[in-house]
Image: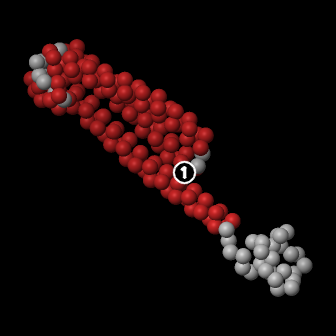
Amino acid sequence: MASLMDDLIQVLENENKEYEHLAELSKEKKQVIIDANVPALEKIVDLEQDVASKIQNLDNRRQKVMHDMSVVLNKPGEDFTVDTVIEMLSSQPKEQERLQNVKKQLKTTLDEVRKINEQNQTLLNQALELVEFDLTLFRSMRTAPETANYDKNAYNTGEILGGSGFDAKQ
């Protein structure tokens, strides 16, 4: 059981490190979004996918360790959580404290990642709204009404800006 406990703590610590790395990438992504640097954004997204893959592997490992612990302790797997393990360690305060600390660190890191991702989502939505506004503006310029485009004889030329642009003689 001690070996499984060490494995669980190690996996949680490694997950926390990967989530911290993800938080750093998300902070970098925030500035890249603000700068509208698409190539840099693509690189960061690729790095985030690598980190997400590592996190998924660690999560699978954590689930396996938790399952193994539930089998050893003869507890139902679906009700067996890290909090359950913490409660069960009341006779081992040192291990209990280690596991509590790792859980607390992981929760703090996850909250930070969530907050940064919400900010990035807001920035991306604003950027999309700006792009949509620009597209609408360009479309409306192409279909502008044919008013105030008169030639010398006061006839409407039918062109939006006059055929050749501005008349320097006027």
User: From what the image shows, is residue 140 above or below residue 155?
Assistant: above
Query: Left or right: 88 with respect to 150?
Result: left
Q: Position of residue 72 (x, y in %)?
A: 14, 15
Between 106 and 121, which is closer to the camera in this rendering? 121
- Image-quadrant location for residue 102: top left
Between 124 and 143, which is closer to the camera in this rendering? 143
Q: Position of residue 71 (x, y in %)?
A: 15, 17
Query: Left or right: 66 with respect to 153?
Result: left
User: From what the image shows, is residue 77 above or below residue 43?
Assistant: above
- Image-quadrant location for residue 77: top left
Between 87 and 151, which is closer to the camera in this rendering? 151
Residue displayed at 31% across by 21% down: 61
User: From what the image shows, is residue 2 above or below residue 127?
Assistant: above
Q: Position of residue 156 (x, y in %)?
A: 79, 80
Query: Left or right: 137 with respect to 128?
Result: right
- Mark 1 — residue? 34
Q: Can residue 64 be seen in the rendering of this structure?
A: yes
Q: Quadrant of the N terminus?
A: top left
Q: Position of residue 122 (x, y in %)?
A: 44, 53
Query: Left or right: 84 with respect to 164?
Result: left
Amino acid carrying mark 1 in the image: Ile
User: From what the image shows, is residue 24 above or below residue 80?
Assistant: below
Mark 1: give few (<14), some (14-19) or many (20+) Cα within 10 Å.
few
Q: Can residue 14 be seen in the rendering of this structure?
A: no
Give the farthest residue toward the bottom.
154
- Find numbered disc 1 in the image and state the secondary structure of the residue it sits on: helix
